Image: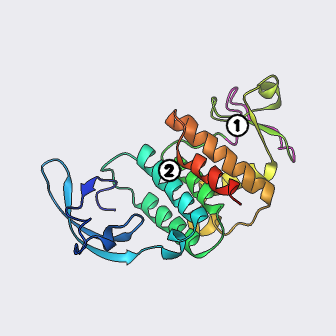
């Protein structure tokens, strides 16, 4: 948290008697003591605070943690401290670990892109910049290329737009203006869950300009059911 996202190495971690082997497993939350190395910092000691053990034993949950981690790795700048993102990330890991509310991962990921400056235009048309009319119950066009929702005029003939329900757009607006402890408690139907998952996945690929690997892994896990 003090240095932001960094890269470091753990020497001899694979040796059976290594004291750092267990405490440097993936998804470990802890206090790390680092020493300055020639190219990369070196992990000297770790005080573990949480291992997220329940999530580690569940393929569905672990796939979501990988998705979050991959997104942070691809989009988060190095060595730029951001306490807000740290707290939001810790919050979503804890909820995924102890509950079955998988959809909170996608709520968090949208909040992450907002915090990184990639929030979608949800109040005005992203093409003509005029205030949009009242939302329809089901079909509201959102265009990733233009960066947000479209008015009825601009959405006409826009083949690359996604239709979202009013409840999903309202949820996105709520996420933008609230913190994880608040938006993670909002209950919404299965359709909104599918919409926000699809939208967030597509938007992250659009921002990164490549397809992230984790969504494919999540899809393969669901196919096993």
Badge 1: few (under 14), some or many (20 or more) residues near its Cα, within 10 Å? some
SS at badge 2: helix
Identity of the residue drawn at 86% across and 44% down: 136
Residues at badges 1 and 2 in contact (C-beta under 8 Å)?
no
Q: Position of residue 219 (x, y in %)?
A: 65, 50
Question: Which secondary structure dominates the residues rendered in magenta?
Answer: loop
Identity of the residue drawn at 59% across and 59% down: 105
In the picture provided, is 161 more to the left or to the right than 117? right
In the drawing, what numbered circle is on residue 160? none
Q: Residue 21 or 164: which is nearer the viewer?
A: 21
Q: Is residue 148 above or below residue 138?
A: above
Q: In which quarter of the image is the C terminus?
A: bottom right
Please identify the residue farthest to the right as the structure is shown. Answer: 137
Which residue bears the numbered disc 1? 124
Q: In which quarter of the image is the N terminus?
A: bottom left
Q: Residue 68 or 163: which is nearer the viewer?
A: 68
Q: State which mark lies toward you, 1 or 2.
A: 2
Please identify the residue farthest to the left as the structure is shown. Answer: 38
Mark 1–mark 2 distance (CA, rounded to whole Å): 20 Å
In the picture provided, is 96 more to the left or to the right than 139? left
Identity of the residue drawn at 34% across and 76% down: 48
Identity of the residue drawn at 59% across and 48% down: 215
Badge 2: few (under 14), some or many (20 or more) residues near its Cα, within 10 Å? some
Q: Where is residue 145 in the image (x, y as percent from the top left)?
A: 63, 29
Query: Is residue 38 a member of the stretch shown in magenta?
Result: no
Query: Is residue 132 a member of the stretch shown in magenta?
Result: yes
Q: Position of residue 147 (x, y in %)?
A: 62, 34
Which residue bears the numbered disc 2? 115
Quarter of the view holding residue 97? bottom right
What is the span of residues highlighted in magenta in the rendered image? 122-137
Q: In this view, does 55 lie above or below 198?
A: below
Q: Earlier in the sequence, mark 1 or mark 2?
A: 2
């Amino acid at each position: 948290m003090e240095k932001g996202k960094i890269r470091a190495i753990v020497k001899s971690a694979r040796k059976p008697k290594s004291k750092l082997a267990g405490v440097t497993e993936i998804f470990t939350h802890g206090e790390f003591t680092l020493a300055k190395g020639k190219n990369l910092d070196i992990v000297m000691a770790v005080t573990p605070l949480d291992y997220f053990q329940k999530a580690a034993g569940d393929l569905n949950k672990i796939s979501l943690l990988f998705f979050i981690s991959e997104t942070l790795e691809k989009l988060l700048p190095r060595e730029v401290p951001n306490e807000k993102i740290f707290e939001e990330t810790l919050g979503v890991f804890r909820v995924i670990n102890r509950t079955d509310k998988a959809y909170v991962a996608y709520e968090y990921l949208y909040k992450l892109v907002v915090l990184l400056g990639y929030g979608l235009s949800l109040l005005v048309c992203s093409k003509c910049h005029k205030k949009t009319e009242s939302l329809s119950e089901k079909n509201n066009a959102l265009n990733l290329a233009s960066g947000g929702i479209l008015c009825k005029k601009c959405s006409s003939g826009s083949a690359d737009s996604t239709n979202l329900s009013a409840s999903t757009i309202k949820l996105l607006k709520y996420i933008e203006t609230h913190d994880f402890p608040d938006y993670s408690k909002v209950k919404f139907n299965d359709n909104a869950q599918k919409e926000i998952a699809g939208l967030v996945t597509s938007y992250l690929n659009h921002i990164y300009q490549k397809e992230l690997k984790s969504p494919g892994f999540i899809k393969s896990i669901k196919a096993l059911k």
